[in-house]
Amino acid sequence: MYLGIDIGTSGVKAVVMPDDGTIAAQETAPLTVSRPGPLMSEQDPSDWWSATDTAVRAIPAKLRAAVTATGIAGQMHGATLLGADDKVLRPAMLWNDGRSFAECEELERQVPTSRGITGNIAMPGFTAPKLLWLRRHEPKIFAQIRSVLLPKDYVRLCMTGDKASDMSDSAGTLWLDVAGRCWSEEMLAACGLTAEHMPALFEGSQVTGQLRSEVAADWGMEPVPVIAGGGDNAAGAAGVGVIDDGDALLSLGTSGVIFVATSDVRPNPDKAVHAFCHCLPDMWHQMSVHLSAASCIDWAAKAMGIAGPAPFLAAAEAAGPAAGPELFLPYLSGERTPHNDPHVRAGFLRLDNQSDAPRMAVAVLEGVAFALADGLGALREAGTPIEQLSVIGGGARSQFWGTILAAALGVKLHYLDGGEVGPALGAAKLAQMTQGGLSAAQACTRPRVREVIEPDPRLAERLAPKQEIFRRAYAAIRDL
């Protein structure tokens, strides 16, 4: 048995997987996000560890006792700052924290070759500009920093006592030489840091340590090996077999991501395409990233007084796609691909006297689909042909949303067994590679295709006018 843990934004998920790649058990413990000021998004790292402990303990004891290796995946970019004795210095600034926009410009001025080193444009969500913000606004905290860890790697520290990370997660810091798969001294120096502040680097399937004896005893497990794992999207890709050049997935979690595996580094920083290492050796990936996806459903359901995502989706389906003129811009936390704009905000446009909750609900689903289509266009501009996408994440549960997404994106969607737990499953498969001596092709196989949704040309034709207005709307509201 293999244990996979995913440190998400809304919760920690733990799964146990036997050798056949199925899911024997899964449990989730919720997390909350603090927003102490404009553009700010934070979590207390101790909450990650508490939720991890809760999720793992909820797995049946017999399955826990049979675990032979553990993998970790997690949300990327979060700045977890440790001082002396590894004490957490402040809440972690998360991937959707936008306060460091000015520091992004400063970083690229200091290192004119930064895009060539990192393969990416500097964005507020990345880790490096957060440290520049801290140096400017919280200098006393900055002076105490001894280590900087990503969210999953803080949990690893709690599990093993080791400070380690993998290439895919570390690529999202802007401190990694993405082609060379090593820390960039130049990028670190620009933030007042050195390699001594950084964790040791590993490929995703390498062992970084083993469970501390007290943690193993608490969890009813042996002190099994813990492997490096991956950033959530890279681990999710490994979980559903997106491991070869050109393989692609769509992740519908809190954020929305289109992920394409590549055999080399293929950047397109001008359109805010991410070019990172994969969690597998000698592989990389491109991503278009949208800061709000399924989170738009959660927000809209609450705002409309609808009791959760399921009845919200049912209301949208009752209205039907392209039900009215309503248009939703899904920029609740700003946007990355292709706009790289932390300031833009969400909004409804084109409401009329007939606009009601069901029609506004379907507009939310359409708006996220249109934003994802913008990101797909940026990937294609980087020379990446995409004809089909494997779908993972919580949003993968809705077939109705899938029909809208397929039509807006113009690609075939493959819904896979276990896709809703993608990163945790991928972490377990990376652990299986290590413990079982398997290759990526042997361990990271594609789960059974549960359903295929083909683009409906008639629906695409009905959505096209709204999609064109959506593309024009960003420019219209950008400076408001």
Image (spheres, rainbow, N blue to C red):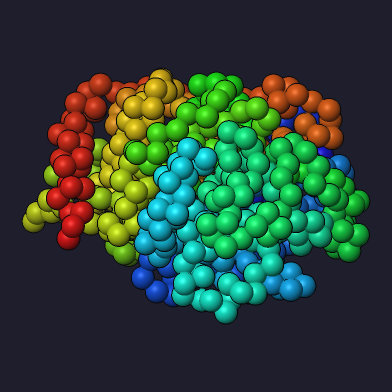
Q: Nearer the viewer, residue 353 or 336?
A: 336
**Quadrant position of the N terminus in the picture:** top right
Above or below, 70 relative to 33: above
Q: Position of residue 205 (x, y in %)?
A: 74, 36
Residue name at image x 75 percent, y 24 percent: 439
Along the line of sight, which residue is nearer the eye, 57 or 150? 150
- Is the C terminus in the top left, top right, bottom left or bottom right quadrant? bottom left
Is residue 284 toward the left or the right of residue 34 in the image?
right
Q: Residue at x 57, y 23 (%)?
A: 263
Q: How many marks?
A: 0
Relative to 34, 376 lies left or right: left
Residue at 55%, 25% in the rendered image: 264
| Quarter residue 455 falls in | top left
Residue 399: x, y in percent? 41, 35
Q: Position of residue 7 (x, y in %)?
A: 62, 54
365 shown above or below 353: above
Tell me if residue 398 can be seen.
Answer: no
Q: Is residue 426 visible?
A: yes
User: Toward the viewer: 450 or 414?
Assistant: 414
- Residue sitting at 61 percent across and 28 percent down? 283
Please name whichever residue, 350 or 227, is drawn nearer the observer in this view of the structure: 227
* Residue 33 in picture, x, y percent from top left: 50, 66
